[in-house]
Amino acid sequence: MIERWHRQLKSAIKCLATEKWVEAQPAVLFGIQCSFKEDLKCSAAELVFGNTLHLVNFLGLIPEISRCLHKSFLQNLRNNVQDLQPTIVSRHSKSNVLSTKIFLTVLTYFFVRQDCVRKTLQKPCDGPFEIISHNDKFFTILIKGKKSVISVDHLKPAFVEIEDPVQLHPVLIQCRPRLRPGMADVCDLNAL
């Protein structure tokens, strides 16, 4: 059964800004169960229980579980559930209404995709970073106070609300370069 929605689970866990993803997993699973499925016109919780589930019901279970679990785990779980925010439902239609090229000329913040070997559940993009200037193929962005020129192929639009403070200096991920097949005997992997 997990094979059907393991990508949804993995992407939901990647969206969390925490390294302790195991502690946030119950809230993520609850959110997936309550998420609206466009093809079914309801959520999985509505199919099983005949009614929508509310986050209040999920929080009501915490005192019953507290007898069995450690207090610090419960405190972290409560903090993770309190930090949850609603997200836009993804649309899986074949028609591409909005093109990335339109966003490249309009938006002022972008994520930078890292093409490297990543750790498990590591985010594929860094950012958001502010765009200073651009032409058709290259963008000049501000990373940690320094200007960097990056190809359009490595950019992904970041939809940031104006009221939200944007973290302009996120931590950049250091990655190992990808090796082509057959290069392992030429390169010393321990030197990377």
Image (cartoon, rainbow, N blue to C red):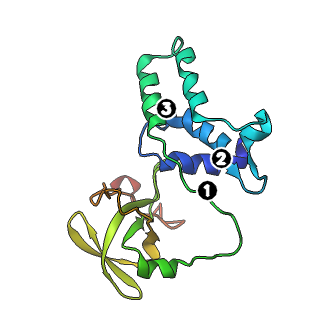
Q: Secondary structure at mark 3?
A: helix
- Residue identified by numbered label 1: 89
Write down the quadrant of residue 54 in the picture.
top right
Nearest-to-viewer mark from 1 and 3:
1
Q: Amino acid at mark 2?
A: Ser
The reply to whether dot 1 and dot 2 touch (C-beta < 8 Å) is yes
Residue matched to label 2: 35
Q: Residue at x 44, y 62 (%)?
A: 116
- Residue 163: which disc? none
Upstream in sequence: badge 2 or badge 3? 3
Amino acid residing under circle 3? Glu
Q: Quadrant of residue 114?
A: bottom left
| Residue at the extreme top of the image, as rendered | 67
Q: Position of residue 112 (x, y in %)?
A: 40, 67
Rendering quarter of residue 44: top right
Left/right placement of residue 28 relative to residue 123 reads right
Distance CA(mark 2)–CA(mark 3):
20 Å
Q: How much space separates mark 1 and mark 3, taking CA atoms? A: 24 Å
Residue 23 — which label? 3
Q: Quadrant of the C terminus?
A: bottom left
Above or below for 184 versus 85: below
- Furthest toward the bottom, the residue is 136
Q: Position of residue 62 (x, y in %)?
A: 54, 21
Closest to the camera, between mark 2 and mark 3, is: 2
- Nearest the viewer among 188 and 44 is 44
At 73% across and 56% down in the image, what residue appears? Answer: 38
